[in-house]
Image: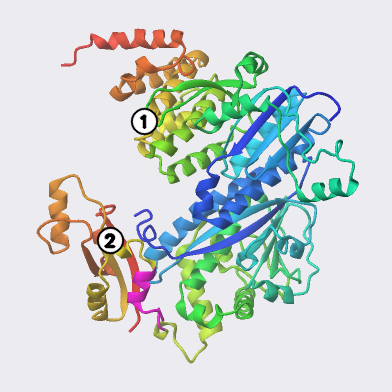
Amino acid sequence: LNRLLTAHTKRILPRYVLCILSPGRTTASEERVQSVIRLTNPLVGDMLRESVEKLSILTDQVYPIVNLDMQFRYGDNPEIADCLTDSKVQNPNQYRACVFTIEIKDNSPTSLRKELGISHLVAVQVVRKGGGWSALGGLSSAKIEVPVELLQYLLHDIALDIAMFHSWPFLVEQFGASPEKGNQFSKMKAEFARQTKRKSFYGPINDESLDYFPLAAYCRRGSGFDYDAYEKLWKEFLQESILGESRNLLDVPQSSDNPIAYIFRHHEYKGQLSPEKISKDVSGLTRGVYLLLLTHKRPKRGIVRTHLAHMFGRKRFRLGLWKIIPFSDFERYAREYPYITFFKFVVSQ
Amino acid sequence: MSKSANYIAFIDLLGTTEFALEDKVKFYNRLISFQETITNNCHLLAGDGRVFFFSDSAYIESDNLDKLVTYLRKVRKALLELGLYMKGAIGTGELNASDPHNSNLIKDRKEVKLRKETVIGHCFGEDVVPIYALQAGLKGVGIRIAENLTQDFVKKGYGVASCYLPIENNRRAECFYDLKLDDSELNDGILKLYLRNFYVTNTKSKKYGRYYLPFIVSWINSTDFSATVLTDSSNGTGSSSVPLIFDLLLLSRSFDKHFTDLVGLEYVFFALLNKIFIECDSEKVKRRVFEYIASRKKLLSRLGTLPTCVMSSETKKQFLEKLSGKVALIHP
């Protein structure tokens, strides 16, 4: 099932992490830390892809792929604001974490977050022994002290929360419009996390005034991750803190987006699809989660081609045949990968 | 620099043009990472060398070979960890960086000042030409050592034999000496990242696929296989007692699964066979490598074209002798 549901979607969110490494002559242990940090990026990428795939199969949501890219700078300046306002930093609003091997300082006003267009920013201090979550004030929403070995998990968890947020269209509509709204959402999430009093994998919450906390940190189990608990926790948070008693999460439209527009915006092979024919089929669908199947690769064996053609209601196989099936039938068709591609979409009404 | 420089090197970041067309943020970040790596390690050359860099390439000179090699290795390691790959060359000579402002000849101080403020850059002496040509001829990841330096480099443990494919639609390999990867560079994380990036790039592309070959051959030739032992648990599932490259090529065979159409795949396997036959004492390990290669017709058909840098004539003889035992074997 590897990469089945995310391989052909082009819905990608670019996000960045800035790493400030000690410059010049470094000791052997510092060098080891730097080496691990530099190798973290691909590890996080692999973990994120796997998590989004797993959640895509487990849940009814449509997740974007978060493309987390780590940038490296060598420097002595521990002030976060200086690092992010540096001329070398492009798109500062897309930075979500700053990793420091030198001791972090954050003396800038909180309003700078708004000026830079950042909804939340995690200050990550690499230490020998983890010290938990605290509020640093200033530009950062929270400070976390972690050993370098846990850095890949932490960055994965922060990015997974971003993917989760963007998988609920009503949240993006309500809180994604401006950095202040995003900041407000982060605060609500941190408050919920503090009240639930669960055990965070990266150490305890030390400050009540924390502006950010990734719920994924509660579901991390060492190198593993409890996806069921994660989904449950998010739903609990949305119901309790966002929707309240008056609205039920089940009644909230899954997608405010027109499914036809969604398909033609994000499908990798949208050029092969006929807008008229797809619109005709999609408009007749009832509320639910569906998969758009498309023949993408020609099997070498004739028997497989015939089987696939029959599956699509045709006598002969050709590339570009398509079909819409309910998401619940996913496993029945999954075995036909890689000859067919799968594209998940939601119909809200 | 007061002392005269004897060694010069040129390095160039690979794939920059492709990134410029693909993603401007990534392109910019690659250049910044290159710049930071070049400058952050400059203390290794302090007093004994100079670096001139522009965009994605750098010229380095030093009169101390050890320092120059340490610097190049540190830079290469940091770039490898970032998934950035470079090609380059090392040779003898001096950069002879020119003064573009002719400040000795122009008497008008204002004019000199204006020139210095407006024009920044250098032109190098003729010694640079062969070094530049050496790296330009290398079609792949690596730091090529000039022929007059190879003996010194091998003696000092800085050089290692490798090969590349000079012509796009031709499988014939050419030998060169690469800057040997040291123990800190031979890190499993780096190899995994390299193969991952290799897989992501279109490996079937004859133009780009061949660029990855020299690094893998150099990696094999830089790795110490003398302590490689196969335990009972390493029957195809991998074992911690073998280097990762051995595991990928022969135990888990993931290399074979994912890079079936790689141009020059035979050089990778025969380089491994050569190293194992020369270095490793374990008969079990030798047998495993031999049997795997002997069972693959495609690899065997390329045996005649192998250059000596991939497989020494002695190993080739040993291999053929072993193989000849199989020739007369009649299967029921």
Q: Residue at x 15, y 55 (%)?
A: A317
Q: Which residues are magenta?
A: A253-265
Residue B161 within the magenta-colored segment of the rendering: no
Q: How is the image coloured?
A: rainbow
Residue A201: x %, y % from top left: 61, 60
Note whether residue A164 is visible: yes
Mark drawn on residue B213: none
Determine whether, in the image, residue A325 is placed left or right of residue B50. Answer: left
Amino acid at circle 2? Glu
Closer-to-camera residue (A172/A14): A14
Residue B41 placement, left or right of A280 = right
- Image quarter (top left, top right, bottom left or bottom right) of the C terminus of chain A: bottom left
- Give left or right: position of B142 versus B168: right
**Could you say which quadrant of the image residue B132 lies in?**
top right
Mark 2 surroundings: few (<14), some (14-19) or many (≥20) residues within 10 A: few
Judge whether B182 appears above or below A305 on screen: above
Letter of the chain that mark 2 sits on in the rendering: A
Image quarter of the N terminus of chain A: bottom left
As helix, strand or loop, the secondary structure at mark 2 comes to helix
**Distance CA(mark 2)–CA(mark 1):** 43 Å
Q: Which residue is mark 1?
A: B169
Residue that mark 2 sits on: A331
Task: Please give the chain letter of the residue carrying mark 1.
Answer: B
Position above or below: B158 against A24: above
Tag 1: residue type?
Answer: Asn
x then y, percent, for residue B141: 53, 33
Residue beneath the point at 26% across and 77% down: A279
Work out whether disc 2 and disc 1 sit on a shared chain.
Answer: no
Residue A66 coordinates in the image, percent (x, y): 50, 62
